[in-house]
Amino acid sequence: MGFEVIFKGKNFIRLLSGLCVALRISVISVAISIVLGIVVGMLMTLKKPVINAVTRVYLEIVRIMPQMVLLFIVFFGFTKMTGSNLSAELSSIIVFSFWGTAEMADLVRGCLISIPVIQYESSKALGLSRLQTYVYVIIPQIIRRLIPLSINLITRMIKTTSLIMMIGIVEVLKVGQQIIEANRKSAPKAAFGVFAVVFLLYFLACWPISCLSKYLEKKWEN
Amino acid sequence: MESVLKIEHMSKKFDDLIVLEDINLSIDKGEVVVIVGSSGCGKSTLLRCINGLEDIDEGQVLLDGETVNPGNRNLTKSREKIGMVFQSYDLFPHKTILENAILAPMKVQKRSRKDAVEEAMRLLDRVGLAERKDSYPRQLSGGQKQRVAIVRALMMDPEVLLFDEVTAALDPEMVREVLDVILDLAKQKRTMLIVTHEMSFAKAIADRILFLDDGRIIEDSDPKEFFTSPATERAKRFLRTFEYEK
């Protein structure tokens, strides 16, 4: 089945470090996306025509373009055009953040406009200041709505890191392929076992996050 | 009688539409004033202008001689003294009933938690909801939610309470429990300004009735007088819409 090659030499460690590369890129991109997404999302609720137009175009680009094309544009196109030397890892962080920010911003916007105006008004009527209204009333409600949605985005981003091997990054899927290649003679059927383990690793990375989301949803459902 | 709330020459426009026109009003301490009128006559806007939720275009609102609207820097301070209960959905859904009641006293008036909880429990008990203190708003019926909203407003010990059609979104059988709470407040000599469509309630609770039409107060009278022999043709027509004949 091919499971035997997993523990040959340093193979398993290599797979794990491949997973680490994928997770590192995801974590950095997710962090950037959350921060920028909140800012852009808040800008989107200001109802300024120029901001609206720019963010709409941005969102549409992200929706239409396959992530792989974005990766190629940044890593091959952009570096050639400007003569700069972006590393593959930095390129993928840029692309993932570009994508994540757009989706995050849309989620934040959705959550913000879903808070009824009366929540702001009744806070005001109680004498709460603007800052207090946000801190005690609005933001806690937004976070509750946002977390389950953004966790879905985070797991999708982790899964999509499997694309970055296309620009030469050796992440978990690529390591898997390398192991299969290297053992083609001794274990010609290793593919199933190796990919099964890769699948398991992705699962182990995403599953706790989904569990956390379920737990929080339950907790806040009260 | 000393006047608590004074409105002088207040006007309000939404773009070109005049919503309130030259409103003059003085409300005494302990007085219960009910505002009636057909929908769109400006009743709710009047309440919203009084506590500064809407800017006004002309005139001013004074509470104890201090300007509330147009806004000055003490606006938050004055808002504390004007409590308001809305039609619906104004409780904070992520907080329990008790937390809803104590948030503003603790954050705005900087009262201790212990002190705030004690008072909240006393008031919740009074409206019959003490044992629901750890429930969340969504677990309560509409009538219970409105009773909590009243408690929350009372927690700030406001000088004037505004009620904006607080029973309009309720099932008929829940209206009573909310109105009973407001009647109880009237007995305690709370100063209140009430917008309502419940005419029998208005008759029972009001010291004074204001009839609003087209953004103006066209009648300001004793409830008995208003309901038996309204002075204007417009008010007569309005009152007739509540009568049914076979």
Image (cartoon, grey):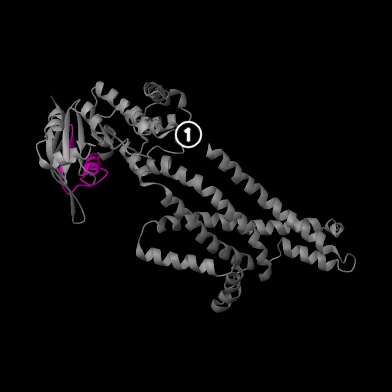
Q: Residue furthest right?
A: A186
B56 relative to B63, above or below? below
**Front-most of A217 and B18?**
B18
Q: Identify the residue shown where x is 50% and y is 47%.
A: A145
Q: Position of residue A34 (x, y in %)?
A: 52, 54
Instruction: Tell me the quarter of the picture where residue A139 sits.
Output: top left
Instruction: Tell me the quarter of the picture where residue B92 sits.
Output: top left
Magenta-drawn segment: B40-66
For the C terminus of chain B, the image quarter is: top left
B184 relative to A205, above or below? above
**Front-most of A90 and B133?**
B133
Residue A214 within the segment the image draws in magenta: no
Q: Position of residue A218 (x, y in %)?
A: 57, 40
Q: Identify the residue shown where x is 62% and y is 59%.
A: A25
Q: Is residue B80 visible?
A: yes
Residue with the mark numbered 1: B139
